[in-house]
Amino acid sequence: MDDVSQQLDKTGETAGQLLAEEGVSERYLATLAFTCKAMADVGAPAPDPWLASLD
């Protein structure tokens, strides 16, 4: 599970870098969506309670 957590952290950092470099781009949104889906798949809590309410 630690490996999965590290991979999710790295993907989240990548999303942050894309946001800083490109703004809300297609690549940023795709990376963010992938990260949120992967978090949900492993049962991680939503990074923001508002996101959890969108189900």
Image: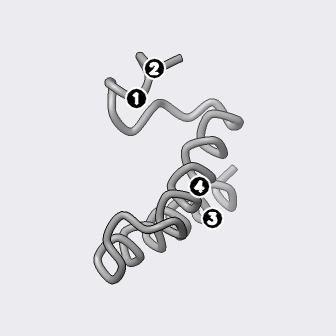
Tell me whether circle 1 and circle 4 mark residues in contact (CB < 8 Å). no
Residue situated in front as seen by the camera: 31 or 24: 24
Residue 7, label in figure:
3
Q: Amino acid at mark 1?
A: Leu
Front disc: 3 or 2: 2
Residue 33 on image: x %, y %: 56, 49
Q: How is the image coloured?
A: one colour
Residue 54, label in figure:
2
Q: Which residue is mark 4?
A: 5
Q: Mark 1 to mark 4: distance in Å?
A: 19 Å
Tell me whether circle 3 and circle 2 mark residues in contact (CB < 8 Å). no
Residue 36: quadrant of the picture: top right
Residue 38 vertical position relative to residue 48 in the rendered view, above or below: below
Residue 25, label in figure:
none
Task: Work out which residue is located at the far front of the displayed protein and give it.
Answer: 26
The residue sitting at 32% across, 25% down in the picture is 50
Determine whether, in the image, residue 17 is placed left or right of residue 8. left
Count residues near mark 1 (Cα–Cα under 10 Å), then give few for <14, some for 14-19, many for 20+. Answer: few
Q: Mark 1 to mark 3: distance in Å?
A: 21 Å
Which badge, 1 or 3, is on the more N-terminal residue? 3
Q: Which residue is mark 1?
A: 51
Q: Amino acid at mark 2?
A: Leu
Residue 54 on image: x %, y %: 45, 20
The residue sitting at 55% across, 66% down in the picture is 11
